[in-house]
Structure formats: structure tokens, C-alpha cells
Image (tube, helix red, strand yellow):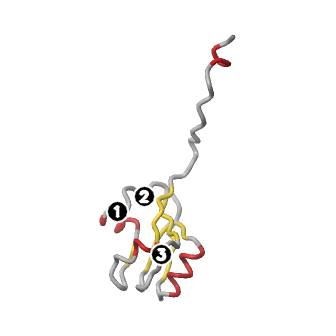
């Protein structure tokens, strides 16, 4: 029997995938009221290890502070919670 039939298949690695870094709202609670949250400030504080192809904000947790959040993407729930707390979201251009 040929070797290609004897050996098992071993998955697929997509060379075009995007590596999006995820940040939850509960993590943003550590910032001061009125702060500007950007991917660079998240890197400096050690919240994320790398930006990759972008940063996405998800709605896990509550936000009680008025923040200006700049990221590449955001979930609908996170946007509503940020606006409810009096904050603003600014979308950064994609990479």
C-alpha cells in the first residue's frame, strides 16, 4: 500500500487567518475614570501580550467608568455597556 494511504492526515493550518486579541470589559475596569484605552496602553500595562491583527472588546463583565476605548472591533453588547457608562468607542483601522 502507498505511504500516502498508510499515514494519517494531520489537519490544516490556514495561512490567511487573522489573530485577533480579545479583551473583556471586566479587564478595562482597572483603568481610571476618563482614561483613553488603546492597544498600546493595554500592551504597556501587560493586559495583552501582542496586538496581532487587531484587538476586539467583548462584553464579559460590567463597566462603571467613563472610558474612551479605541480598538479594531467590538461586540454589540460591549458597545452598549460602554455607551451606558457614558464612554465612547472609536474604531481603529484594520491591519
Q: Position of residue 79 (x, y in %)?
A: 55, 78
SS state under label 1: helix
> Pointer 1 and pointer 3: residues touching (CB < 8 Å)?
no
Mark 1 vs 3, N-terminal side = 1
Q: Which residue is mark 2?
A: 51
Q: Which residue is mark 1?
A: 43
Q: Nearer the viewer, residue 53 or 28?
A: 28
Q: Position of residue 35 (x, y in %)?
A: 36, 80
SS state under label 3: loop
Badge 1 crowding class, 10 Å Cα cut-off, few under 14, some 14 to 19, many 20 or more, is few
The answer to which image quadrant residue 39 occupies is bottom left
Mark 1 vs 2, N-terminal side = 1
As displayed, is residue 51 above or below residue 85? above
Residue drawn at the location 51% of the way across and 65% of the way down: 56
Res. 61 mark = 3
Q: Position of residue 62 (x, y in %)?
A: 47, 79
Mark 3 vs 2, N-terminal side = 2
As displayed, is residue 19 above or below residue 47? above
What separation in Å lies between label 3 and label 2 (alpha carbons)? 21 Å
What separation in Å lies between label 1 and label 2 (alpha carbons)? 8 Å
Amino acid at each position: 500500500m502507498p505511504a500516502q494511504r498508510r499515514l494519517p492526515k494531520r489537519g490544516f493550518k490556514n495561512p490567511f487567518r487573522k489573530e485577533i486579541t480579545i479583551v473583556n470589559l471586566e479587564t478595562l475596569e482597572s483603568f481610571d475614570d476618563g482614561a483613553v484605552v488603546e492597544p498600546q496602553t493595554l500592551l504597556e500595562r501587560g493586559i495583552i501580550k501582542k496586538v496581532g491583527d487587531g484587538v476586539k472588546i467583548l462584553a464579559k463583565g460590567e463597566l462603571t467608568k467613563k472610558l474612551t476605548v479605541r480598538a479594531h472591533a467590538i461586540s454589540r453588547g460591549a458597545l452598549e455597556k460602554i455607551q451606558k457608562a457614558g464612554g465612547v468607542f472609536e474604531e481603529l483601522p484594520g491591519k
